[in-house]
Each structure stands twice: as C-alpha cells, then as structure tokens.
Image (cartoon, grey):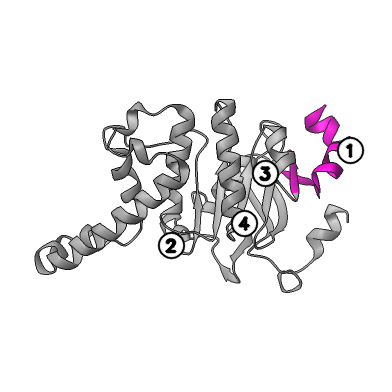
Amino acid sequence: MPVAQRQEQTTAGRQGLLVAERLTRAFGGPPVVDGVSFTLARGSITGLIGPNGAGKTTLFNLIAGSLAPGGGTLTLDGARIDGLRPDQVFARGLARTFQIPRPFPAMTVLENVMLAPPGQAGERFWTNWLRPAAVAAEERRNRDRAMLWLDFVGLAKLSAQPAGVLSGGQRKLLELARVLVAEPRLILLDEPGAGVSPPLLALIMEKIAELNARGTTFLVIEHNMDLVMTLCRPVLVLAQGRLLLEGSPEEVRRDPRVVEAYLG
C-alpha cells in the first residue's frame, strides 16, 4: 500500500501498540520529521532504517518524550503520550536505549540496574525514616530482579564490577538489562549493533528474539542490515524526514527508491 494511503488511515482504523499520526518536528528550518505516520503491531520487531540525517533519532526522541512534536499525535495502547516527559512515557511502559550507552561508570553493574525501576520508596527521604523495613524489602526485590536480568543478558558474573570496565558490547547489554528491570511493553533500541563485536552482536540478536517471543515489542534503529533483515518484520524506511516505505525486508531490499536513498 502506498505511504500516502497508509497515512490517510485514522487511529480508530488501526490496531497496534503504538500509533503515530502525522508526527512533525522542525528546528527553525524545514521539518526534520515531516508528517510521519505508522503503527507498531503488538509483539512485533519493527526496523527503522534510512540514511544519516533522515530524522531517525529525532523520531525516536519524539516517541520517548525527549522532544515534543510540533504536530501530530502519539498513542500507546490507546492513550495519548505526545507531549509527556520521558519519565512519564517510561512509567507507561515505553523504554529506550541509546546508541552510546550511558552507565554510571563508578557504580557497580548491579547498582546500575537497580537504579532503573521508577518510583522506588527509598527515593523519598521521609520513607527511609518512617518505613525502613518496607524500603529494605523493596531493595531486596529490586536486587533479585536486577540479578535475574543480568543473568539473562550474560552479565551476572560481572555484577560486582564497576560499569566502567565493561566493553562497548557489554555496556549495550547492561543498558538492555536496565530497561528490562522496569518490564516495559515497548522498547526502542538505538543501533544495538553499533561498535559491537560479532560474538556479542549474535548474543544481542538472540536476546532480542527471545524477549520478543515472550511478548515484548521492539522498534529498532539499525545500520547493520544483516540484523535488520534477520530480526525485523516490518521495516520502515525514513528519508528526508518522511516515511518512504513500510514493508517486509524483501520488499525493502528490492524497492528502487530505497536502493537510491539508502542501500545504493
């Protein structure tokens, strides 16, 4: 179906976990994201590709709440999230990772993951004095959950090490564990394969597929076309801020517009 026809569909006519309708964002010049509409099907791994400068990161920032759209709407599971702060979006079950992971290097791997769950009782000063037992019990639960996800991503043996000693690929796995401890419904992955060794890339791909099989939905920005073609169904192609094509990896690979704009 042509993109123009897809964008004419209304939210009411779509079924999906996340629905973007005519999202637009400019920074004083031409729009960086220009009327982009798409639906993420629940339980899918959707790829987002395009040349440098296509607007992919800006689109991610709009979805995650780091930027407010200049126009258009975003709904997550039927509720509007456009204009919400990142912490509010996160609390509604949408989490993201970054192309360059941002751990606290002096804190241990375990402590980095334990920081992630929102709304912890120990964050409120008075609770530590009035309900110390409840704070301690919650901390034990968070520690157990953090170790569970560190074991899942293969970092349990490094849990007591400072995060600063991790390799680039291990930092991406740590960031994934930090996201998972909050049990989001939708995860935005920003170039999970960038700068990662082949063995760790294979592990990351395996974990994404396993989480997806458990029901987690993903939107993935990625330049590694092997990862995209292996994991992602469908693939969105962004060019000059507009959605050029939405289709299967095979359709994307064959489309002459994509070849000219990106794959060429």
Magenta span: 235-264
The answer to whether the residue labelled 4 contacts the one labelled 1, judged by CB atoms less than 8 Å apart, is no
SS at circle 1: helix
SS at circle 2: helix
Q: Which badge, 4 or 1, is on the more N-terminal residue?
A: 4
Residue shown at the point (40%, 45%) measured from the top left? 150
Residue type marked 1: Arg
The answer to whether the residue labelled 2 contacts the one labelled 1, judged by CB atoms less than 8 Å apart, is no
Question: Around disc 1, counting alpha carbons within 10 Å, would you say few (fewer than 14), some (14 to 19), or many (20 or more)?
Answer: few
Q: Is residue 69 visible?
A: no
The answer to whether the residue labelled 3 contacts the one labelled 1, judged by CB atoms less than 8 Å apart, is no
Residue that mark 1 sits on: 254
Measure the C-alpha gap from mark 3 to mark 1: 28 Å
**Quarter of the C terminus within the rendering:** top right
The quadrant in which residue 207 appears is top right
Q: Position of residue 86 (x, y in %)?
A: 45, 54
Residue type marked 4: Ala
Residue that mark 3 sits on: 31
Q: Which badge, 3 or 4, is on the more N-terminal residue?
A: 3
State left or right for residue 104 relative to residue 263.
left
Q: Which badge, 3 or 1, is on the more N-terminal residue?
A: 3
The answer to whether the residue labelled 3 contacts the one labelled 4, judged by CB atoms less than 8 Å apart, is no
**Quarter of the N terminus within the rendering:** bottom right
